[in-house]
Image: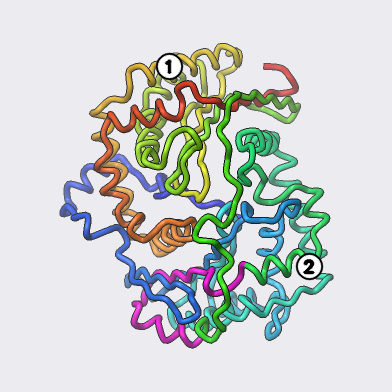
């Protein structure tokens, strides 16, 4: 199970971004970001092509519009376990043969399960593309559910859960925070699943999930690299296009998920564990995303402004970091996290880790003071102007990557957004005003319930 970065890879940012932008002719909104080509096969499978002719290589990705948030009640973990089983046998390929063929042809591959989508990808030379397309098309409908393989992969997933969650106090705390934050929306369940439910999954559960969701009309093929849509279309028709059209399982883009009700009470969670070496304080607010607002609260119109808020207030040069880490010397780290891209309601998180000798009470009081200052005084207009330069520069870097466009477009489309939403991101960022950022911060934070969490080393601060 892999996690992808936020909308653009912020790690690509450097200090010479303003100089870089000065050397690049300004692009109009019509130019977009990735300038993809798209078409749809007769069976309903959507195809997106991002041409990049620097090297004769392509990244081939199949995204299914289903994630752990779409699992039936009591069946958490079924999406992720099925992802593991997709690398086992089909009616035409023996177990593990898919991966061996990709490796023999000089390629690499992997897969990931998230809350809103599941994806499979390979990076290969362009002359090997049709081969991996044929194999991927094969496992869309021809997967074999061998009881021995199911049990083997169940043990692999349980061990993965032990290593990544149960052995990490911070991950355990995050599970409890999510379960407290979302009262009804299925983001409250971990993507990997609860251990007792993973153990209880059977072949019928897996097959039903596979047959319902793994159909062409519920899939998006994204290919990025040394190919055009005209070149890809006959390959797609000869592989994926051979699969019969089957009904798509979704009702629009809602997927019939339960709604999150209005929240009326704040919660507080504390985890004490002797394995903790660095305490952590956080406060999480329910926040709108691009697709879903908050019942009785902030709407989707605030999503882009909240992205700007994390940049100008919580970044490594922002007021929050300076107040708590540099000037106040109360914390070793501090910041804000937010993501706008999910299908369901998002979350805005303030977090900090105290310096040795600083109590969590003092750290919390300092953080609350900075949040109050934000709500009272708002953000600085000049910081927003500079942040726009950096954020729009990320789209320039993203165009250079072989896989970034495929990942961003696939994640967006599988979460209910459109290509226009992705291509219009720089324009939306450019339109953000200080007033919009301040309004978004107040709508999400002021007078709203939250979940405060403390990670402590065996009860000792």
Camera-side residue of 351 and 378: 378
N-terminal of the two: label 1 or label 2?
2
Camera-side residue of 245 and 356: 245
Camera-side residue of 321 and 427: 427
Question: Where does the magenta region start and end?
Answer: 213-238
| Point 64% across, 37% down: residue | 183
**Mark 1 or 2, closer to the camera:** 2
Q: Which residue is mark 1?
A: 372
Residue 259 position (above or below residue 102): above
Q: Is residue 216 magenta?
A: yes
Q: CA distance from mark 1 to mark 2?
A: 52 Å
Residue 340 position (above or below residue 403): above
In the image: residue 151, left or right of residue 448 = right
Residue 279 position (above or below residue 345): above
In the image: residue 117, left or right of residue 389 = right
Identify the secondary structure beneath mark 1. Answer: helix
Q: Which residue is mark 2?
A: 204
């Amino acid at each position: 199970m892999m996690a992808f970065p936020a909308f653009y890879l912020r790690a690509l940012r450097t200090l010479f971004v303003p100089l870089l932008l000065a050397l690049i002719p300004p692009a109009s909104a019509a130019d977009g970001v990735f300038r993809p080509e798209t078409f749809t096969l007769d069976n309903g499978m959507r195809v997106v092509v991002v041409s990049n002719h620097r090297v004769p290589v392509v990244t081939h990705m199949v995204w299914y519009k289903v994630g752990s948030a779409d699992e039936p009640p009591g069946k958490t973990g079924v999406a992720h376990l099925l992802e593991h089983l997709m690398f086992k046998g089909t009616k035409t390929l023996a177990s593990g043969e898919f991966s061996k063929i990709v490796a023999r042809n000089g390629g690499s591959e992997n897969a990931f399960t998230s809350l809103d989508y599941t994806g499979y990808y390979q990076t290969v030379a362009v002359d090997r593309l049709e081969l991996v397309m044929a194999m991927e098309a094969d496992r869309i409908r021809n997967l074999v559910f061998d009881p021995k393989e199911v049990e083997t992969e169940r043990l692999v997933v349980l061990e993965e859960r032990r290593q990544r969650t149960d052995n990490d106090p911070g991950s355990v705390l995050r599970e409890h925070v999510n379960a407290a934050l979302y009262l009804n929306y299925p983001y409250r369940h971990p993507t990997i699943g609860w251990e007792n439910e993973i153990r209880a999954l059977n072949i019928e559960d897996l097959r039903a999930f596979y047959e319902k969701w793994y159909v062409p009309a519920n899939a998006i093929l994204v290919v990025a690299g040394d190919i055009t849509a005209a070149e890809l279309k006959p390959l797609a028709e000869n592989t994926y296009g051979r699969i019969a059209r089957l009904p798509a399982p979704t009702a629009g883009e809602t997927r019939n998920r339960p709604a999150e009700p209005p929240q009326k009470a704040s919660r507080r969670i504390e985890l004490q564990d002797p394995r903790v070496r660095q305490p952590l304080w956080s406060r999480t607010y329910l926040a709108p995303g691009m697709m879903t607002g908050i019942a009785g609260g902030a709407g989707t119109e605030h999503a882009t402004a909240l992205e700007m808020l994390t940049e100008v207030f919580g970044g490594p040069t922002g007021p929050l970091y300076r107040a708590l880490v540099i000037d106040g010397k109360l914390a070793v780290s501090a910041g804000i996290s937010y993501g706008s891209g999910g299908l369901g309601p998002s979350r805005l998180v303030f977090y900090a880790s105290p310096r040795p000798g600083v109590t969590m009470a003092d750290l919390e009081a300092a953080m609350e003071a900075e949040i109050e200052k934000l709500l009272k005084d708002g953000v600085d207009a000049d910081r927003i102007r500079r942040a726009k330069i950096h954020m729009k520069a990320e789209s320039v870097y993203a165009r250079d990557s072989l896989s970034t466009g495929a990942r961003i477009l696939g994640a967006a489309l599988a979460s209910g957004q459109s290509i226009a939403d992705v291509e219009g991101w720089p324009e939306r960022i450019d339109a953000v005003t200080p007033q919009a950022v301040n309004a978004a911060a107040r709508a999400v934070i002021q007078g709203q319930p939250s979940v405060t969490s403390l990670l402590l080393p065996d009860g000792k601060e």
